[in-house]
Image (cartoon, rainbow, N blue to C red):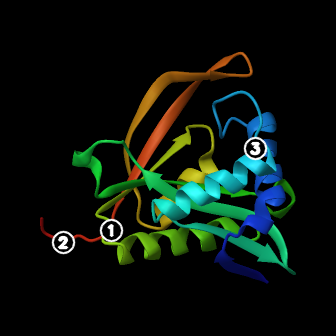
Amino acid sequence: MVELRPARPSDAVALASIYNDALVNTVAIWKSGTVTSEERVSWLEDKHQTQFPVIVATDNDKVVGFATYGYWRPYDGYVHTVEHSVYVDRNSRGNGAGKAMLVELIQLARAQGKHMMVGCIESGNVASIKLHQKLGFEESGTFKEVGVKFGRWLDLTCLTLQLNPKWKL
């Protein structure tokens, strides 16, 4: 049974491992170089200071995934919009952890009074795109060949979810 809780510094090794596996073996992250557990601790501290959540999914007390959101863009005009990330350990995919974390992120962002949530996904990741659509995200567009990894061009599909439709400025 997957359980969710806020991430803590003691999760840093698992967070780095899950992130690095996605970075090295998938097209989910379009950058080179891996992260250390020490860097994940600093990252958690930064998230805490900016009041953005990091949650983990656990299965029998083992961290099997993590999710967060943060600034969409670093300018005042985007303050009500967040972009999220969800990562699940390769051996735990398909067990509901990703969906549970995304649902929790949506609830947390609504509670923080955010207006729009953005998810940008490599266009070949059909499972992730379908999950987002099942949760109410709408496709906002696809950017063709904006990234490169493993010697090939990658497309980026962006999906959005209006979190607080009745919210007024």
Q: Nearer the viewer, residue 46 or 112?
A: 46
Identified at 71% across, 52% down, the residue is 40
Q: CA gap, disc 3 to disc 2?
A: 36 Å
Q: Which residue is mark 3?
A: 22
Task: Residue type at mark 2: give it.
Answer: Trp
| Residue 131 falls in image quadrant | bottom right
Looking at the image, residue 167 sits to the left or right of residue 63; the answer is left
The numbered disc on residue 167 is 2
Report helix, strand or loop for mark 3. helix
Neighbours of disc 1 within 10 Å: few (<14), some (14-19), many (20+): many
Do the residues under discs 1 and 2 have CB atoms within 8 angstroms? yes
Neighbours of disc 3 within 10 Å: few (<14), some (14-19), many (20+): some
Report helix, strand or loop for mark 1. loop
Q: Which residue is most to the left?
A: 169
Q: On the rendered image, what quadrant is the C terminus found in?
A: bottom left
Of mark 3 and mark 2, the one earlier in the sequence is 3
| Residue 66 falls in image quadrant | bottom right
Do the residues under discs 3 and 2 have CB atoms within 8 angstroms? no
Task: Residue type at mark 3: give it.
Answer: Ala
Q: Position of residue 116 (x, y in %)?
A: 32, 59
Q: On the rendered image, what quadrant is the N terminus found in?
A: bottom right
Identified at 87% across, 59% down, the residue is 91
The answer to whether residue 96 of the structure is visible from this angle is no
Q: CA gap, disc 3 to disc 1?
A: 28 Å
Of mark 3 and mark 1, the one earlier in the sequence is 3
Q: Which residue is mark 1?
A: 163
Q: Position of residue 54 (x, y in %)?
A: 60, 65
Task: Residue type at mark 1: give it.
Answer: Leu
Q: CA gap, disc 1 to disc 2?
A: 9 Å
| Residue 67 falls in image quadrant | bottom right
